[in-house]
Image (spheres, helix red, strand yellow):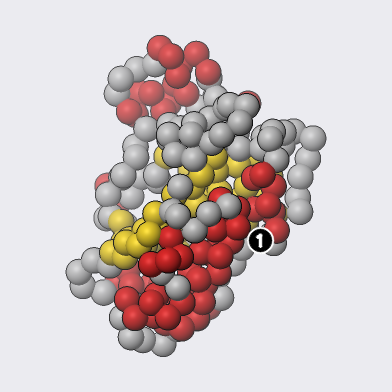
Amino acid sequence: MQTSPEQVRWRMGNEPCVLEEIASQGVHTAVWRRSLSPVVAAYARTLVDREGSLRIRAHGTSDLDRRSIVERLPEGPGRDAFADDVAQGLGLYAQAAGTTDFQVDLDVVETDKCRRFHVDYYRLRWVCSYVGPGTEWLEDRDVAAEVLDDGPRDHEAFNLALVRNPDRLRRLGPGDVLLMKGRGFPGPGFGGPLHRSPPVEHDGLRRLVFTMTS
C-alpha cells in the first residue's frame, strides 16, 4: 500500500486490500490502482465500439452473479474474463459495504454526466471506467472551500474557482477503482471526496463505466 502522512482521508494502493481502508473512520476514499489484463481491456473496447449502447442494471448479488453477467454480455473473445472481473468487483463491494443490497450499473457513457465537482448523498459508491477517461477527484487540501458555499452557478466557472491547483487534479485510469463514502455514510459525519465525471462529450469519446451504489 502506498500512503504518506498527507493522505489523512484517502488511501491508495496496487492491491484490492486497499479497499478495506474505507472502513476506517478518518478515511473517505480508497483507490485501487490496477492495470486491466489485455484480454479484459480488449473485450471492454468491443463493448464501447459496437453499435448501439450497452446497459446492465441489477440489484446486488441477488440479481447478478458471474453466470448472469455472462448471459447479459454479447459473445466474443474475452467475455468470460470480463465477467470474472465484474464478479470480483461485486464480491469486493459487498464486503466493503457489508451488504448484498446495492444498485449495480454497467453502461456505455458518451455524455458529461456530472460536470460540476460535487459530493453525493449515497452511503458508499464504487466507480470503475474500463474504457475511456476515469472519474476526476480532489484532495481536500486542493479545494477552495469558500467556493462551495458561494461559488459561481456556471459549472465551468465553479470548477475553475474550486480547484486550487489544476496540476494536482486526481484522475483514474482504465481499470482503476474509486471507492468513496457519501454524505449518507453512518457515523461521525463528513462527505466523501469532491469529484466529477470527466468531460468527454465535446471530443466524442465513449466510456464503459461500472458503478455500484448503496
Question: Residue at the location (51% across, 77% down)?
Answer: 84
Picture layout, residue 103 above or below residue 84: above
Q: Nearer the viewer, residue 120 or 176?
A: 120
Residue that sits furthest to the left in the current view? 52
Q: Is residue 31 left or right of residue 66?
A: right
Picture layout, residue 31 above or below residue 150: below
Q: Nearer the viewer, residue 135 or 213?
A: 213
Looking at the rendering, which quadrant does residue 74 occupy? bottom left
Q: Residues within 10 Å of mark 1 (few under 14, many from 20)?
A: some
> Would you name the residue on which mark 1 appears?
16
Q: Position of residue 12 (x, y in %)?
A: 68, 49
Looking at the rendering, which quadrant does residue 15 occupy? bottom right
Q: Nearer the viewer, residue 63 or 42?
A: 63
Q: Nearer the viewer, residue 1 or 63?
A: 63
Q: Is residue 131 visible?
A: no
Q: Is residue 20 visible?
A: yes
Question: Residue at the location (55% across, 25% down)?
Answer: 143
Question: Residue at the location (34% across, 81% down)?
Answer: 71
Tell me the quarter of the image containing the N terminus: bottom right
